[in-house]
Amino acid sequence: MASSMTTNNNSWNVNFLNGRPEAGDPKRALVILNQPFSFPLLQRLWSSTQWHCCADGGANRLFDSLDPQDRIKFVPHLIKGDLDSIRSDVREFYKVLDVTIVQDHDQDATDLMKCVSALEEKEKLEHSQQYHIILLGGLTGRLDQTIHTLSYLHKLRKTRKRVFAVTDENIGWVLDSGEHRIEIDHNLLGQTCGLLPVGIDHTVLSTSGLRWNLTEHVSSFDGLVSTSNHLVPDEKVVWIKTSKPIWWTVELRMAT
């Protein structure tokens, strides 16, 4: 299996989950949201990313996930948001370490959106290619926040090539209309997966590499939704064709 994303925008892998970056990997940015996560998952994602940002209360989550001796090893580049959630002790700790802390009062943007905006400013200054964005969190906790993640990544597909949402339980991202080839590392991914018609009226799906494949099958919230599908142990690639954007999600094996 290739060590990084291919240049084909419709070819995917999640090798960053193994925590072992390799030469030729794309630049990646980690945005830590205000939701719980395990230290092993944090460690893997941190090692695979070059820029680290906490969205407001995500700084509390980072701080609390670490033993005191490890806190100076995992220092973010930026903490940004309206800063109504970050604790005073956490803010002071990172201030002493010269972490950039930005308060943004824009009520039309969430803390996640503000962090992505900061990354886009960084990319302009660096005249660099887009970073791949990895959100730590966003698919658990409050339903309204989860819906925001689903909605925001649906919109970001128009301007960003790679945005993933990762929790200890699963990983998900938006597949735009067209054909997609997803490389499957069974050491990282669990069995259960789903193809979710979120934010659209319906789509027409065809797949290969799944336990229950679809052929020109209409999927919608009013009809079929392919949840609780399964990866096949001997299959190294899942192929998906969709007429409209969908969310692809698959469970993760426990990070150790």
Image (cartoon, rainbow, N blue to C red):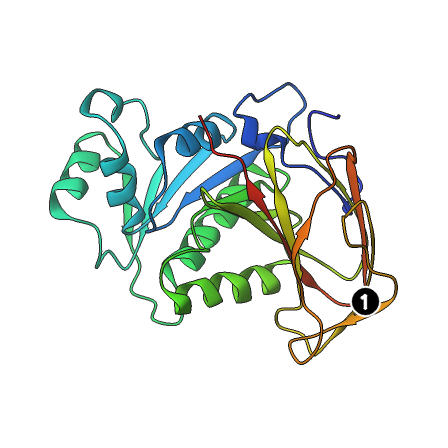
Give the farthest residue toward the left.
89
**Residue at left offset 46%, top offset 40%:** 30
Question: Quadrant of the image for the C terminus?
Answer: top left
- 50 over 247 or under it: above or below: above
Identify the element where label 1 is drawn: loop
Question: Quadrant of the image for the N terminus?
Answer: top right
Q: Quickly name the residue at label 1.
A: 243
How many labels sit on residues? Answer: 1
Percent coordinates x, y for residue 19 in the rendering: 52, 25
- 59 over 70 or under it: above or below: below
**Residue type beneath disc 1:** Ser
**Residue at left offset 53%, top offset 35%:** 253
**Residue at left offset 14%, top offset 39%:** 92
Residue 158 visible in rendering: no
Percent coordinates x, y for residue 152 in the rendering: 53, 63
- Viewer-closest of 207 and 21: 207
Q: Is residue 67 left or right of residue 124?
A: left
- 233 over 210 or under it: above or below: above
**Residue at left offset 36%, top offset 41%:** 37
- Viewer-closest of 189 and 6: 189
Crowd rating for badge 1 (residues with CA inside 10 Å; few <14, some 14–19, many 20+): some
Hey, which quadrant is residue 97 in on the image? top left
Percent coordinates x, y for residue 136 in the rendering: 44, 44
Residue 151 visible in rendering: yes
Q: In this view, does 249 lie to the left or right of 255?
A: right
- Viewer-closest of 6 and 173: 173
